Image: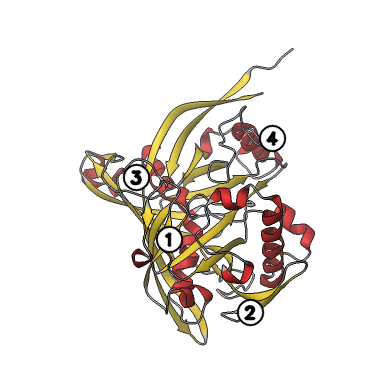
Amino acid sequence: MPQPQLRIPATYIRGGTSKGVFFRLQDLPQSCQVPGRARDRLFQRVIGSPDPYSAHIDGMGGATSSTSKCVILSKSTRPDHDVDYLYGQVSINTDFVDWSGNCGNLSTAAGAFAIHAGLVDASRIPGNGTGSGTCVVRIWQANIGKTIIAHVPITNGQVQETGDFELDGVTFPAAEIVLEFMDPSDDGDDGGAMFPTGNLVDTLDVPGVGSFPATMISAGIPTVFVNAADIGYQGTELREDINNDPAQLERFEKIRVAGALRMGLIQTPEEALKRQHTPKIAFVSPPKSYTASSGKAIEAGDVDLLVRALSMGKLHHAMMGTCAVAIGTAAAIDGTLVSQAAGGARPVVRFGHPSGLLRVGAEARQVNGQWTVTKAVMSRSARILMEGWVRVPG
């Protein structure tokens, strides 16, 4: 007998320049409330993956790295935290879900959804859940074991979603949410450091591509930065300049794999196939004027540097939030390729990406010879697009 579809409470949310399907842990089928194959298969079916057509016609995904995402939130059992936030990056055309990193853009939506979903105690919301002001949501990012603080605007006890805050890469304005990524560098149990190689700049040898300088940093998300000019680019490229050329994408993947090996994230090149979400690969350039994908003119004087980054094998249409943390952190440290492109270290940096501009700040300092960052700060917005139930075949 054909099985009826499962009907699971879900909320479809835009966070920053990404979109994802959000779930409360308690609403998932019992077999999917714990990590494992059942959970992965559910998220793949929700998104519509793996899809050999790379179209996600039979799912909620949008066939891009920015829209192939699922999130689980639950009340936190950790002291001084409101919610636990777990993020799955669903591969578009291959059979896996990557749990190795965070999504900085959807971190914005995680703070808002936590309030929408009743996961934040009323005592933490202005007026005990009836007033207006700002709710400080303390998020435990479970993928990477870090704290994120979301400052969510509240009107009459409800999340305020509309407003006049404009974010390049998002068509319409919305309410501003300020995110603080606390201690975002990698200092976990694996002994990882902000600069895993111990150097601000290394010479990266990439088989079949060449050798060139690279800054490899773990802050927000592990990221490999290279100079645009060293790999034949201007730094003003848009998505169509790169994503329609398989040879260019293959070359970037070789650079990413070489960086992952040097950073100790993988032991063999083959492991990179199951770790597409991390590390990111980004290329930087000093300021130049260019036209953003929206047609907006970006003048060289408007930015401190240009950055283009790839996510899940494609040039991102704007900038990943976690990669923005890496950019802000590297910009605050004199001697990295990022701060060199910006003309020197600075605590707040404005960088140009394919969709426009983004501003991010970071507090970095040296402790016992090791670089550390106390927090990185940026503004995003979030909005519920649809809520109800998502259906998947039983």
Query: Which quadrant of the view contains residue 57?
Result: top right
Name the residue beneath numbered marker 2.
Answer: 202
Name of the residue lying farthest toward the top: 1
10 Å crowding of disc 2: few (<14), some (14-19), many (20+): some
How far across and down, in percent of the image, does residue 21 sit?
Answer: 51, 37
Q: Is residue 183 left or right of residue 63?
A: left
- The residue under label 3 is 121
Q: Residue under label 4, please give it.
A: 51
Q: Is residue 11 above or below residue 301?
A: above
Q: Which residue is mark 1?
A: 352
Give the secondary structure at mark 4: loop
Q: Amino acid at mark 4?
A: Asp
| Residue 51 occupies quadrant | top right
Graded by Cα atoms within 10 Å as few (under 14), some (14 to 19) or many (20 or more), the crowding at tag 4 reads many
Q: Observer-nearest residue: 218 or 119? A: 218
Q: Nearer the viewer, mark 3 or mark 1?
A: 1
3 or 1: tag closer to the N-terminus: 3
Q: Is residue 82 visible?
A: yes
Counting residues from the start of the chain, the first of labels 3 and 4 encountered is: 4
Residue 353: percent from the left, percent from the top?
Answer: 46, 57
User: Which quadrant of the structure image shows residue 373?
Assistant: bottom left
Residue type at numbered disc 1: Gly
Q: Which secondary structure, mark 2?
A: strand
Mark 1 touches mark 4? (CB < 8 Å): no
Q: Earlier in the sequence, mark 3 or mark 2?
A: 3
Q: Residue 226 in the image: x percent, y percent?
A: 59, 70
| Label 3, label 1: how far apart the Cα atoms are | 39 Å
Between label 2 and label 1, give the one nearer the viewer: 1
Query: Marks 3/4: CA distance?
Result: 40 Å
CA separation, marks 2 and 1? 24 Å
